[in-house]
């Protein structure tokens, strides 16, 4: 589904990505781990078009996407979430989801403006999709609260919901469990597993090694801007080079 080949990126003389290549399949969870500063989030930014690579190629189902803008890449089917959720803090939870649902609307703005009657039908459809997502994420009790009042875990759920309303085929999830209480962490894990069942191609960056090893089909270990090791979680866990990269012990 997603093929990343030989990606390089410099920031002000710092060689942050040094020839990263990886592949990820539909209906699979691909975990990306690595020490702080390894380049994991930069890799997501490059894949999703927020940052342009200096060199390299990215294809989505064989179609090159590395020259597209972030919005064009989202339309092509690849969407990312952020380590620090980027919700609209002044809007309610429901309205945050409505904005995401309207962005994903197939009806063009022009058509809606030309046919006002259909606009309210479109608005109803947007609200219905947002409400269905509220339900799916069990965020109904906080639907009318402003997003800034949410807990860390609820913000991660909202961020996931906003991404899902774009109906991605490839979803990049950046540190879903950071700052999340155990109960919501389990809920987030369930959502990731459900999305895999639905055939979404998931790539997940995570420092919680136990959680990511437990849910991933394949793990890539990024160290100093390059893939050090990849494989099934149980293989990666025992790899000497991985243990060395983590100074002898894998964090939990
Ligand atoms: N926009 C930027 N300008 C300059 N340097 C940057 C920029 N973005 C990232 N970097 C640098 O690139 C390196 C890799 O950062 P990145 O956030 O991709 O690492 P990471 O593996 O995601 O780390 P963490 O696990 O701590 O989130 C770091 O040294 C960081 O300071």
Image (spheres, grey):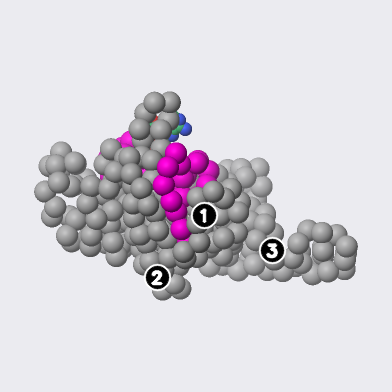
**Residue 175 in picture, x, y percent from top left:** 39, 48
Disc 1 marks which residue?
65
Q: Nearer the viewer, residue 203 or 225?
A: 225
Residue 45: say if magenta. Answer: yes
Give me the C-alpha separation between circle 3 and circle 1: 22 Å
85 on left or right of 100: left
Badge 1 or badge 2: first in the primary sequence? 2
194 lies above or below 68:
below
The residues bearing labels 1 and 2 have C-alpha atoms spaced at a distance of: 20 Å
Question: Up-down: is 13 above or below 67?
Answer: above
Q: Upstream in the sequence, badge 3 or badge 2?
A: 2
Q: Earlier in the sequence, mark 3 or mark 1?
A: 1
Point out the residue furthest to the top here: 12
Dot 2 falls on a residue whose secondary structure is loop
Q: Residues within 10 Å of mark 3 (few under 14, many from 20)?
A: some
Q: Quadrant of ligand 1?
A: top left
The residues colored magenta run: 34-60
| Residue ID at (34%, 55%) | 22
SS label for mark 3? loop
Do the residues bearing badges 3 and 2 touch, measured as CB atoms within 8 Å? no
- The residue that disc 3 covers is 105
The residue that mark 2 highlights is 27
Residue at 85% of width from left, 59% of height from top?
113
Q: Is residue 210 visible?
A: no
């Amino acid at each position: 589904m997603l093929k990343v080949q030989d990606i390089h990126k410099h920031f002000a003389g710092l060689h942050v990505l040094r020839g990263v290549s990886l592949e990820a399949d539909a209906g699979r969870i691909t975990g990306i781990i690595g020490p702080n500063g390894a380049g994991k989030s930069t890799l997501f930014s490059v894949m999703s078009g927020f940052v342009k690579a200096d060199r390299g190629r990215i294809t989505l189902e064989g179609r090159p996407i590395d020259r597209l803008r972030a919005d064009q890449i989202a339309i092509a089917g690849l969407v990312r979430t952020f380590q620090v959720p980027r919700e609209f803090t002044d809007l309610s939870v429901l309205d945050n989801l409505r904005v995401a649902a309207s962005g994903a609307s197939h009806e063009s703005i022009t058509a809606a403006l030309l046919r006002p009657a259909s606009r309210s039908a479109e608005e109803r459809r947007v609200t219905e999709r947002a409400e269905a997502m509220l339900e799916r994420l069990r965020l109904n009790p906080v639907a009318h609260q402003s997003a800034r009042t949410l807990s860390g875990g609820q913000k991660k759920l909202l961020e996931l919901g906003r991404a899902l309303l774009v109906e991605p085929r490839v979803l990049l999830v950046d540190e879903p469990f950071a700052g999340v209480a155990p109960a919501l962490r389990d809920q987030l894990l369930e959502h990731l597993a459900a999305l895999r069942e639905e055939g979404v191609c998931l790539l997940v960056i995570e420092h919680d090694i136990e959680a990511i090893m437990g849910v991933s089909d394949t793990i890539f270990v990024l160290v100093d801007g390059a893939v050090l090791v990849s494989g099934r979680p149980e293989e990666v866990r025992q790899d000497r080079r991985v243990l060395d990269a983590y100074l002898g012990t894998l964090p939990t």
